[in-house]
Amino acid sequence: MRLFAAVRPPDAVTEELAAAAAELKRLPGSGTLRWAARDSWHFTLAFMAEVPREALPDLTARLTRAAHRTPPFTLALRGGGHFGDRVLWAGVTGEVAALRLLAGRADAAARKAGLAMEEPRHYRPHLTLARGHGATDLRPYADALAAFAGAPWTVDELILVRSSLPKSGVPGERPRHETVGRWPLGGGARVPDAAG
């Protein structure tokens, strides 16, 4: 199964960003972009690609420790940018060093659980808003996001998400994300979820 560790902003925070995204969708060319659904917005910490079921117990134990060792921290969505003509994203401010530390710990947890990971690189926290196909210049969208400043929130959990790729072949269909594990930062009991 395709898994990734992530941090997800709360509903009140994504509501503010959704209002800003609605304005972006009024810009010329916005219809050529694939806009990410609000319920899928997150900050990826470590992408694990294909994870065998037998690796899950070790992975979850290691993610539990990573969360336990990381105290809660404060972030706020701020501004935006783009990666070439492919990804439009919202940025983040606040205790970004703590977010980077948690990302490093999640990546280390996956590696120590024996999962094949990409080569380590500098972590660039971002929340993907839309994807392009090279036909639309993303600079005007990033410029329009420059003044965006969301309310701060406390990051208090690490989540593990299963990403199921579309199989229908229907144009515009997006991956489905399902939270399969969550752990409170700073210790404490495991937060229950639908997967038990």
Image (cartoon, helix red, strand yellow):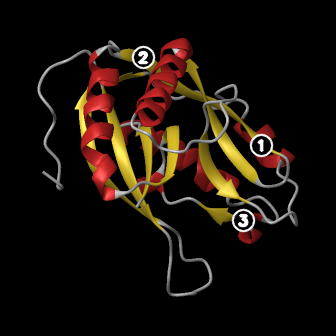
Q: CA distance from mark 3 to mark 2?
A: 31 Å
Query: Which numbered dot is residue 99?
Result: none
Q: As drawn, is 3 to the left or to the right of 192? A: right
Residue drawn at x 73%, y 32% is 146
Mark 3 element type? loop
Q: CA distance from mark 3 to mark 1?
A: 13 Å
Specify few, some or many for label 3: CA neighbours under 10 Å numbering under 14, 14-19, or 20 or more: many
Query: Which numbered dot is residue 74?
Result: 2
User: Is there a contact, CB below 8 Å, between mark 3 and mark 2?
Assistant: no
> Type of residue at label 2?
Thr
The relative height of residue 147 versus residue 6 in the rendered view (above or below) is above
Q: Quadrant of residue 67?
A: top left
Residue drawn at x 44%, y 30% is 106
The foreground one among 140 and 39 is: 39
Q: CA distance from mark 2 to mark 1?
A: 24 Å
Mark 2 element type? strand
Looking at the image, tell me whether mark 3 or mark 1 is earlier in sequence order.
3
Looking at the image, tell me whether mark 3 or mark 2 is earlier in sequence order.
3
Query: Which numbered dot is residue 33?
Result: 3
The relative height of residue 167 versus residue 104 in the rendered view (above or below) is below
The foreground one among 140 and 94 is: 94
Specify few, some or many for label 1: CA neighbours under 10 Å numbering under 14, 14-19, or 20 or more: many
Query: x and y percent of residue 90 in the render?
Result: 63, 38
Query: x and y percent of residue 180 in the render?
Result: 27, 51
Looking at the image, tell me whether mark 2 or mark 1 is earlier in sequence order.
2
> Type of residue at label 1?
His
Specify few, some or many for label 2: CA neighbours under 10 Å numbering under 14, 14-19, or 20 or more: some
Q: As drawn, is 153 to the left or to the right of 87? A: left
Residue drawn at x 70%, y 38% is 145
The foreground one among 156 and 115 is: 115
